Amino acid sequence: MEWGLFTLTFIFGYITCKLLYFLKATRTSFHIIRASQLVAVGLLVQSMEDFYYAKVYRMEKMIESGETDHNITAFSYRMEEEVSYFKKRSIQTLIDLHPDVFKQLLEFEDWPAAMKFLEANKEIVASFLARRKDD
């Protein structure tokens, strides 16, 4: 009788340990996925800033070189279309990369929703993207 009780206690403890480890690993994976979403969207926003600066710089150079207003306007429209396509495609790629199990963790489905998600978590992204003195 004693050995049976010891065996049952051991089995119960082992199963409890495995279950708690599984739950901790699941929670950790959810946090990692959320953090990777935040970092990815934050980097996309930084690339949008770079697109804007490149556009302004190119337009200034076009004006300095004497390009016509028509060419400058055409360049501006073309750049806006490229940026719009980049936004749409990058968010869709982020969504497509999530397996079905993790689709429920997504808090955005398009660019405006991704910006709201980023705004709600801006402290996390800012601390990640901040440059440190030792870097």
Image (spheres, rainbow, N blue to C red):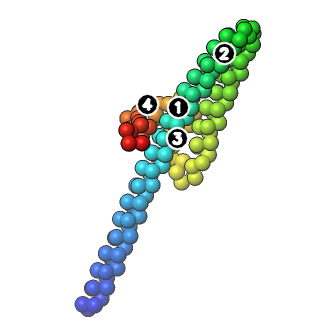
User: Which image quarter: residue 14?
Assistant: bottom left
* Residue at point 50%, 43% (across, down): 37
**Badge nearest the viewer, 2 or 3:** 2
Three-letter code, disc 1:
Gln
Residue drawn at point x = 61 percent, y = 24 percent: 54
Residue 74, by quadrant, is top right
Residue at 27%, 85% in the rendered image: 5
Q: Residues at badges 2 and 3 in contact (C-beta under 8 Å)?
A: no
Instruction: Please name which of the two marks, 2 or 4, marks the residue nearer to the observer.
Output: 2
On the image, numbered disc 4 is attached to which residue? 119
Which circle's residue, 2 or 4, is located before the other in the chain? Answer: 2
What's the amino acid at mark 3?
Ala
Q: Where is residue 53 in the image (x, y as percent from the top left)?
A: 57, 22
Which badge, 1 or 3, is on the more N-terminal residue? 3
The 10 Å Cα crowd at callout 1, few under 14, some 14 to 19, many 20 or more, is few
Q: Which mark is residue 46?
A: 1
Residue 31 visible in rendering: yes
For residue 68, above or below residue 83: above
Label 3 sits on residue: 40
Please state which amino acid type lies under the numbered disc 2: Lys
| Residue behind mark 2 | 61
Mark 4 vs mark 1, CA separation in Å: 14 Å
Query: From the viewer's perspective, is the residue at label 1 or at label 3 nearer?
Result: 1
Residue at 54 percent of width and 26 percent of height: 49
Q: Distance between the residues labelled 2 and 1?
A: 23 Å
Q: SS for tag 3?
A: helix
